[in-house]
Amino acid sequence: MAILNWSAAIQHCQQRGSGYVIATIINTQGSTPRDGGSKMVITTDATYDTIGGGQLEFLLVQQARELLAQNKTCQILKPIPLAAEAAQCCGGNVTVMLEAFAACSWQIALFGAGHVCQSLVTILAGLPCQVRVIDNRPELMTNSLPANCRYEFYADPTETIAHLPDDAWVIIFTHDHALDYALCKTLLSDQRWAYAGMIGSQTKALRFRKRLVDAGFAAQAIEKIYSPIGLPEVKGKLPMEVAVSIAAQLQSLYYQRVTVQSGLSTSWRDIKTIMQVQKTTGILCE
């Protein structure tokens, strides 16, 4: 991978759905390695750009990775006297803002790259999720996808399920009813997912439920697969209309089940105290 600057690194992390911390020097006094406004981005296994290196950067990277381990979004303002805390001989003072952004926990797997899928990814592009588009037809994987989506080719798409993360959201709308059924069976044998839905008519759904019961799966487990998928209140049969119905159901269920994780941030009272101390000691510039 090419070496990225801090702004490109933010885009890279957002596209991957990985957590990251932006470290920004917001104020300096005296001799310091970098000026105010300098930034770097820190992930669990890499750093991009620099705010001066040395012990200062080492300490901030260490604290940033402690925030990443909590996987919560938060902001912390940290004043650092370089001589006393970072043992750097330049002897100045810096104030650094650490902005932590949690990794994306909403992982969606779309089985089938057809018309409804192509419409759905245009909607999912604007939601806080990471999307895999899985199909066994490479000729359908030529259209460009939004930044938070990617294609995955599998000759047998059922093999993908074992590699999905825990609590994945799975949507089935392939071109083949036999493949749809095989995917349902595999999902019921590996129930680590948070949501599963399958496109189709009510007749198809009833026929699949009967076949799955006959195959030995519990009716209670089968009922966890939403089929027909989507909100019944959202009408229409065009690909985009179906996609809107599916997206509405996904978003409704997601926000019912998921609590947005926010970590402890520096309070406004503490920020005012830090700023007041810096102003009275000459650290804060007018």
Image (tube, rainbow, N blue to C red):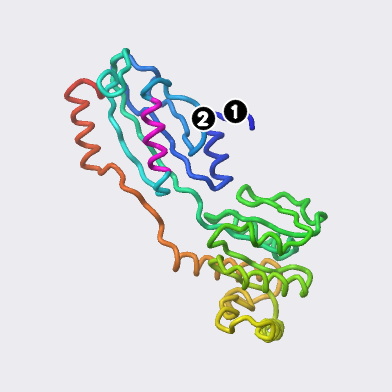
Residue 12 belongs to the span the image colors magenta: no
Q: CA separation, marks 2 and 1? A: 8 Å
Q: Quadrant of residue 28?
A: top left
* Contact between labelled residues 1 and 2, with CB atoms less than 8 Å apart: yes
- State whether residue 253 is above or below residue 31: below
Seen from this angle, which residue lies furthest front?
A: 216
Q: Position of residue 253 (x, y in %)?
A: 50, 69
In the figure, 137 relative to 212: above or below?
above
Mark drawn on residue 154: none
- Secondary structure under tag 2 reads strand
Q: Which residues are magenta?
A: 57-68
Front one among 216 and 58 = 216
Q: Position of residue 282 (x, y in %)?
A: 21, 20
Q: Earlier in the sequence, mark 2 or mark 1?
A: 1
**Which residue is rendered at x = 75% and y = 57% of the image?**
154
Q: Magenta stretch: residue 62 in it?
A: yes
Instruction: Return the residue at label 2.
Output: 48
Q: Secondary structure at mark 1?
A: loop
Q: Nearer the viewer, residue 155 or 116?
A: 155
Q: Residue at x 62, y 74 (%)?
A: 229
Quadrant where the C terminus is found in the figure: top left
Q: Main secondary structure of the magenta part?
A: helix
| Amino acid of disc 1 | Ile
The quadrant in which residue 159 appears is: bottom right
Residue 191 coordinates in the image, percent (x, y): 57, 69
Q: Which residue is mark 1?
A: 3
Which residue is found at the position 65% from the left and 82% from the top? Answer: 216
Q: Residue furthest left?
A: 280
Q: Is residue 240 visible?
A: yes
The local crowd at label 1, few if under 14, some if 14 to 19, many if 20 or more residues have their Cα within 10 Å, is few
Q: Split into 4 quadrants, where in the image is the N terminus? A: top right
- Quadrant of residue 266 within the rendered picture: top left
